[in-house]
Amino acid sequence: MPAPVDHSERRDRIAEIVSDIISRDGLDAVTIRQVATAAGYSTTIVTHYFASKRELLLYTYQAAATHAQRRVDAVLGRDPLDLQGYLEALLPLDEASLREWRVYFAFWQLAAIDTEFATEQQRGERHAREGIVRILEARARAGQGPVPADPEAAARRLLTLLLGVAVQAMFDPLDWSAGRQKEFLTGELRALGACRPAMPVA
Amino acid sequence: MPAPVDHSERRDRIAEIVSDIISRDGLDAVTIRQVATAAGYSTTIVTHYFASKRELLLYTYQAAATHAQRRVDAVLGRDPLDLQGYLEALLPLDEASLREWRVYFAFWQLAAIDTEFATEQQRGERHAREGIVRILEARARAGQGPVPADPEAAARRLLTLLLGVAVQAMFDPLDWSAGRQKEFLTGELRALGACRPAMPVA
């Protein structure tokens, strides 16, 4: 009797391969045939799971986001008030997260012209922002650290900074080393609650 | 006698068409043949100017950056101290600049894996940062507005915020309307010189 096929495992294996191709050769290089060859599957098996390159990319993006979420969950499992850890888990600080960011970049290019992909991206950004708000509120309840007057605005600002850092770190890794990314974040978090840039300066 | 061929005009016409295709259908849809058809040229003419899709994209990116630079120059021509105007000229506030940002996104996807493209992107970012530093210094000399203690750090922060805003505005234009993008920027500029997030809070 043949072993039962683990469909979810196959999908994840395919997403891994798509990630590899995007990281190495870019989105243009992703074809159903190329993916099938690298996975050791027939193209029929690949198209059984993913009808198009578009579907392949959507799943690969979601898989990358799931990996990032796992890192975030691990951080908050250790310390639910660790805002710096939360943000660092989302930055391109090592090869694994750089690889995820390359997938995001490939995805963005399509999200800029495709409503479904844009909605997925919106969801991810709002989710990240809500996560920041929750930590800020938990810190307030625990009486830990300065708490910004407007957690929503602070979260919006922190996510904006995080995205800006990630974009620069991708292209200028010497200027934006992992150390500098963390340092920059530390500076912003230190000032949190101490300045309120959205408020007029008296 | 046939009219002399204006090569620079042809190149720019081709770059415009590539921009259109990227904005409408994404980078995947850009092929030499497609570009030739849209331009009314033979593929031989297109390949005379651009040997590959890669070269096409590099030129199109540079053309988008040149357009943005012209907007910046126009702002500074009116008022060399207008930092808000400088930054707004770089944000995706209208259809023309959104189109440029779609070209940047297509370019980023390749810059994430291609050293020459990454270098081009680094150059653009450093250039934008230097522009901010120059305006901050000119404002200091003119005694206009609060001047940050560390203009380099302030410029780095402002460009980081600008990139983060642009990325979000591309996917969530309702949440990041032109009005909100400007308002966010105004808040940050108002606080400039008033808080120094890179310094420890006593």
Image: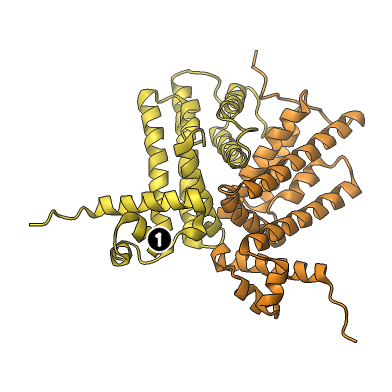
Chain colours: A orange, B yellow
Instruction: Please state the horizontal and vertical placement of residue A133, each as a whole percent of the image.
Output: 80, 34
Instruction: Please state the horizontal and vertical placement of residue B182, each as a whole percent of the image.
Output: 56, 27
Vertical arrangement, residue A69 with respect to residue B32, above or below: above
Kind of element beneath mark 1: helix
Which chain letter goes with mark 1?
A: B
Name the image quarter holding the N terminus of chain B: bottom left
Residue at the image position 46 percent from the left and 44 percent from the top: B100
The foreground one among A142 and A153 is A153
Judge from the rendering whether residue A8 lies leftward or rightward of residue B13; answer left or right.
right
Which residue lies under the disc numbered 1?
Answer: B34
Judge from the rendering whether residue A157 lies leftward or rightward of residue B58; answer left or right.
right
Name the image quarter holding the C terminus of chain B: top right
Residue at the image position 29 percent from the left and 65 percent from the top: B48
Residue at the image position 88 percent from the left and 34 percent from the top: A138
Vertical arrangement, residue A16 with respect to residue B10, above or below: below
Instruction: Please state the horizontal and vertical placement of residue B109, each as a whole percent of the image.
Output: 55, 56
Q: Looking at numbered disc 1 in the image, what kind of residue is underneath it? A: Gln
